[in-house]
């Protein structure tokens, strides 16, 4: 039986009422926009790459939803390649997001279906930060995630908080880009690829769409999307989505409450220029398990996470996150006389208060400075703010186009963590006994750090013929870290230090269109990963940093895509050499970092959808992946040796139904020294169905009922090694969430 935390998460129908009230007071008499559109033109490229012509000489960049052909099969394909891509990409459109992904999900649940992608969501889709999001074996922090073309991350290690920003209802498409891109692909971790998330764009006509969803584990989502239509003489349009969600989660005492607001305004400035304003706000409260031992699974069940015992370090109130985030940008896109200008000025912020028992589900006994039975814990804060700008300029010159630009980003971070007596809710002065204040005596870390990134680029696209083009260029990367820490992480001593690095990354890609349906590409490119902040977690970082170079990859990829009315099919082969692997060792008890070894990646990937007729289609993808560490020839952790998916889709008028199965092959984890633990393979099948109809109610255009069953065959095997306990290094695991369902009702009003 799943324990409940719903006492802390009261249903909030007032929130939905607020959404509807705002909708009703919206400008109902707004003019409808013209068919040729006032939608935003966005994305990191200085050119418009949304052309559906397979012979287009515009290369596919990371613009988000850019389905390469407006064919019938493209509208229902779960994932599909692009006929204008210059490296392997899987585009996942709004149909799959809204029909198949649970309403609580996030971008990681969308990307999970793509070839070579392996994810772990132990509490249910979107109900806890994803523990693993692996692309070909590259882990979170080794690839970019962008929102409307803007790279975002925690600057200390470039990882991403999957539940802390945009929701599925605010997402129009996700592109999984498996490669470092061209010179114009920007970000601190082009190393392993890019997951591009594109936001909603305003619709041409006024519409209000309230929605509500209920599901397993006392899950509920309430919200509304409001599109204004064109409401000024110049064609201004806007969209807003307001949402509230709560769930007890699959794991015991792992409840979540999440509230989100997203808005976008698109303002045309004449015929060739568009100004876009977009912003989001997200508030998240979450109880967070860190994993479960096999002994606890045997005693309490495979979904054991936390408990309701205030004398335990596993007590749910001692293990929680309180996170507030926001993001906003102003985008300008203009095309005139062979010139293209694209600029985004942005900011985003993350404010996280975290609490945990000292050794949840572990063996460390209770006891603090104040009492042998008091519960020890830790309280932390991590807050950051980024300000940045992405400028892109393109000009037709000779038989092609030159593109240049620059990305600037500055992120400031504040981090602290204190040992705590959770029983008394006060500092536990065991970190630095004898310090001048109680807070300093309990401080594990007190740090201020910053990261500045500057990336100018230059590339040229040579249109060799109407069917062939070559894109070549280079990107210069400069990044600088500063730290001012009264109490540095790991060492506990003061540190003030600064270090900068740079790297130049060339790229070359060739694209050829055999005809309007069939294209192919070849790519050679360099990727890189900026050094992690943990290089500074040593007594004297000068010793380590003087010899450290950014981790780099050399990528060679070949691929092809076919897209017609009934069939979309893509395939690629890749070989990636990763070097300058940053490792650490201890000399006379002092940790030092150095470059040593790397990983060799290679594999084959396929994906395709075929329309059988009568509304029926079949979808499949698959990958064979290999990732071997060069120092010891061991298999790289979190790298399945293969993935596969098979799906059957029925889409005919108002009816949609699908049955999709995703298989993840065996992976290896190191729980203890000399202990390589294999996990998997395993498969998870999901069923989804919906029906849209006219209820013949005044001011209600459409009414939609949807139903999802996730993990249809109730596979609850172990799928992830979450870590080890603090005292005895006992492995902690997560399992696949049990069979669960969601029931959703939505409407289009007016």
Image: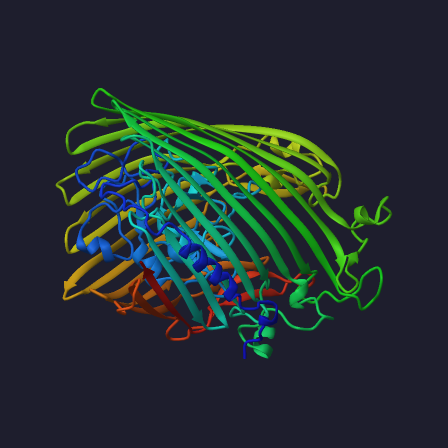
Image coordinates for residue 370, horizontal then vertical, percent: 85, 62
**Residue 267 appears left or right of 434:** left
Quadrant in the picture for the C terminus: bottom left
Quarter of the figure with residue 656: bottom left
- Residue at the image point whose x is 39% and y is 26% from the top: 405
Q: Is residue 268 above or below residue 157?
A: above
Does 264 sit above or below residue 5?
above
Image position, residue 81 (x, y; %)? 26, 48
How is the model colour-coded? rainbow
Q: Nearer the viewer, residue 741 or 730?
A: 741
Give me the residue at 52% from left, 64% from top.
14
Residue 56 horizontal side relative to residue 60, left or right: left
Which residue: 46% across, 55% down? 242
- Front residue of this view, candidates 739 and 297: 739
Residue 51: x and y, percent? Answer: 22, 39
Residue 638 appears in the rendering: no
Position of the N terminus, as image quadrant, is bottom right
Q: x, y (%) of residue 458? A: 36, 25
The answer, for residue 108, to whether it is visible in the render is yes
Please identify the residue farthest to the front as the structure is shown: 29
Depth check: 405 or 545 in front? Answer: 405
């Amino acid at each position: 039986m799943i324990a409940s935390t719903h006492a802390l998460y009261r249903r909030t129908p007032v929130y939905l009422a607020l959404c509807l009230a705002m909708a009703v007071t919206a400008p109902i008499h707004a003019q409808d926009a013209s068919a040729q559109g006032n939608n935003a033109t966005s994305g990191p490229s200085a050119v418009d790459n949304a052309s559906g012509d397979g012979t287009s000489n515009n290369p596919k960049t990371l613009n988000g939803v850019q389905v390469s052909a407006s064919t019938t099969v493209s509208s229902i394909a779960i994932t599909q390649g692009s006929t204008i891509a210059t490296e392997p990409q899987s585009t996942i459109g709004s149909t799959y997001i809204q029909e198949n992904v649970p309403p609580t999900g996030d971008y990681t649940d969308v990307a999970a279906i793509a070839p070579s992608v392996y994810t772990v969501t132990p509490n249910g889709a979107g109900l806890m930060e994803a523990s693993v999001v692996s692309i070909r074996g590259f882990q979170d922090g080794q690839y970019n995630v962008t929102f409307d073309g803007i790279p975002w991350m925690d600057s200390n290690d470039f990882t991403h908080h999957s539940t802390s920003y945009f929701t599925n209802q605010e997402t129009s498409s996700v592109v999984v880009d498996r490669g470092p891109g061209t010179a114009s692909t920007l970000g601190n971790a082009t190393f392993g690829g890019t997951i591009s998330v594109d936001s909603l764009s305003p619709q041409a006509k006024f519409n209000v769409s309230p929605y509500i969803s209920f599901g397993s584990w006392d899950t509920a989502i309430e919200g509304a999307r409001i599109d204004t239509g064109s409401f000024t003489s110049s064609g201004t349009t806007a969209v807003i989505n307001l949402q509230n969600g709560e769930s007890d989660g699959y794991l015991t005492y792992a409840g979540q409450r999440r509230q989100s607001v997203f808005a976008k305004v698109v303002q045309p400035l004449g015929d060739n220029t568009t100004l876009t304003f977009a912003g989001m706000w997200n508030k998240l409260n979450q109880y967070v398990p860190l994993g479960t031992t096999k002994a606890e699974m045997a005693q309490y069940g495979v979904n054991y996470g936390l408990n309701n015992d205030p004398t335990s370090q596993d007590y749910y109130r001692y293990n929680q996150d309180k996170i507030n985030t926001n993001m906003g940008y102003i985008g300008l896109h203009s095309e005139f006389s062979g010139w293209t200008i694209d600029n985004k000025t942005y900011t985003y912020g993350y404010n996280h208060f975290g609490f945990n028992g000292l050794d949840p589900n572990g063996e460390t006994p209770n006891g603090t400075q104040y009492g042998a039975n008091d519960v020890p814990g830790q309280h932390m804060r991590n807050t950051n703010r980024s300000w940045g700008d992405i400028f892109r300029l393109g000009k037709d010159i000779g038989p092609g186009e030159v593109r240049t630009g620059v990305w600037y980003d500055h992120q400031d971070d504040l981090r602290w963590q204190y040992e705590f007596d959770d029983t008394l809710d006060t500092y536990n002065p065991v970190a630095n006994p004898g310090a001048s204040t109680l807070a300093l005596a309990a401080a594990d870390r007190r740090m201020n750090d910053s990261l500045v990134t500057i990336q100018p680029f230059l590339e040229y696209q040579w249109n060799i013929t109407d069917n062939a083009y070559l894109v070549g260029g280079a990107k210069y990367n400069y990044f600088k870290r500063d730290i001012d820490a009264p109490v540095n992480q790991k060492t506990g001593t003061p540190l003030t230090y600064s270090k900068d690095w740079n790297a130049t990354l060339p790229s070359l890609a060739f694209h050829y269109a055999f005809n309007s349906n069939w294209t192919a590409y070849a790519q050679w490119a360099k990727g890189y990963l900026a050094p992690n902040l943990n290089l500074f977690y040593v007594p004297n970082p000068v010793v380590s940093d003087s010899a450290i170079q950014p981790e780099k990859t050399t990528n060679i990829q070949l691929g092809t895509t076919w897209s017609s009315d009934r069939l979309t099919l893509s395939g690629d082969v890749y070989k990636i050499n990763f070097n300058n692997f940053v490792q650490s060792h201890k000399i006379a008890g002092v940790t030092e970092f150095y470059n040593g070894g790397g990983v060799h990646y290679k594999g084959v990937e396929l994906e395709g959808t075929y329309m059988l007729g009568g509304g029926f289609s079949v979808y499949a993808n698959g990958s064979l992946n290999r990732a071997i560490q060069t120092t010891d020839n061991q298999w790289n952790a979190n790298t399945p040796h293969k993935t596969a998916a098979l799906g059957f889709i029925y889409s005919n008028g108002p009816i949609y139904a699908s049955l999709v199965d995703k298989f993840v092959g065996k992976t290896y984890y190191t729980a203890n020294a000399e202990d390589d633990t294999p996990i998997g393979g395993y498969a998870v099948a999901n069923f989804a169905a919906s029906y849209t109809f006219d209820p013949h109610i005044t001011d209600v255009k459409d009414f939609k009922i949807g139903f999802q069953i996730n993990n249809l065959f109730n596979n609850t095997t172990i799928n992830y090694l979450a870590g080890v306990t603090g005292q005895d290094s006992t492995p902690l695991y997560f399992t696949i969430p049990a069979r669960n369902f969601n029931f959703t009702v939505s409407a289009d009003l007016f």
